[in-house]
Image (cartoon, rainbow, N blue to C red):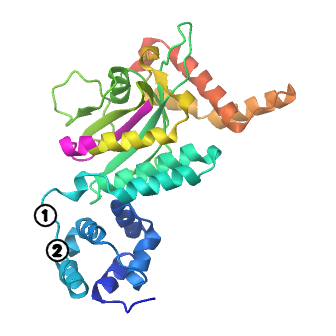
Amino acid sequence: MEMEATAWRKLLENIIADAQERQRIANRLGVNPATLVRWARGETNPRYENLQRLLKALPEQQETLTQLLLEEFPTFDMPVGEDISEQIPAEIYSRILNTYVNMQDAQRSWYMSDLIMQLALGQLDPNYLGMAITIAHCMPPSGVAHKVCSLRQNTGRGTPPWNTYLDQGLLFLGIESLAGYAVSVGHLVTVQSRTEQTFTPVRWEEWEKSAVASPILLGGRVAGCLIISSTQPGYFLEFRQKLVEQYTELLTLAFRSEEFYALRDIELSLMPSQETQRLRFSQFRQRVSDVLREASQKQHPVTVREAEQIVWADLEADLLALPISHHS
């Protein structure tokens, strides 16, 4: 039965009137945005742990909101001890597993990747300081040695100054990159600032002040890498690194078993600069269309996904064949 909207619910209703803020808070709490609307309307009551997370997600309104919550929930109190933001809430695990079991095979990889990036972004950058999260997939083995020679970074998620959707981040990464290094050594790698003295390879991008790369591992095999950049130097403290590792473990659900490769089959090459690569990406869609048309003419039709994989492999081969002068 619907309850009368109390003062804290009215405050929440005003806050979540902005769709972007509603999504941010939902990601931070690990709930659906519709759940916040039901709380605001008095249709349901949040559990105490969700009220605590709500306070954490709204630092500017925390004092006022605490007082209003106590009017409806006299026994409620602020959390003590360990900061709940230092662990992934149970609701997030539940939401991810529910999505996994209910998603069709053809859609599972994209939806799982996007959902996990959204939720990780909500917890790792709750105050919108500026963060970018991308996933790089291992390219299928190629060459005479039949080894994985590069990672393909595709879509991602971000908070300002990055765009919400990082669809323009398409890039092949090799051993010259932080992600490539993390995949090669088989464990999480972080660089805390541009001025840090380190032998770890990293190519800094605009706005990026610290970064972490965590290989996506399952049973000693690797499928790719989770890459996270922050506008804040020194942002990836130990507790955040543990969170990154936990979200990376969840990302194994977004990959098929055949997309994981033994570490001994990883021999990443040096890939050309972003500028050189993007010049060659401009004709990607046209090349996919050409593959589809040629396959149809030969009466051996392929799917769009298969055509894309063929073009990616051709692009990788083209880039690997370029002289070293294109790698700076």
Instruction: Determine which residue is flagged by label 1.
Output: 80
Q: Does the CB distance between marks 1 and 2 fall below 8 Å?
A: yes
Tell me the crowding category of disc 2: few under 14, some 14 to 19, or many 20 or more residues within 10 angstroms, Cα based: some
Q: Residue at x 28, y 69 (%)?
A: 54
**Magenta-highlighted residues:** 224-242
Horizontally, residue 78 falls left or right of residue 116, namely left
Q: Measuring from the top left, give residue 212's x and y in whole percent.
A: 29, 37
Q: Measuring from the top left, give residue 78's x and y in whole percent.
A: 16, 70
Q: Measuring from the top left, give residue 76's x and y in whole percent.
A: 20, 77
Residue 58 sits above or below residue 201 on the image: below
User: Is there any visible trace of residue 207 in the rendered image?
Assistant: no
Q: Is residue 230 magenta?
A: yes
Tell me the crowding category of disc 1: few under 14, some 14 to 19, or many 20 or more residues within 10 angstroms, Cα based: few
Instruction: Tell me the quadrant of the picture where the C terminus can be found.
Output: top left
Say the numbered circle drawn on residue 77: 2
Disc 2 is placed on an element classified as loop
Horizontally, residue 168 falls left or right of residue 307, namely left
Horizontally, residue 310 falls left or right of residue 10, namely right
- Amino acid at dot 2: Asp
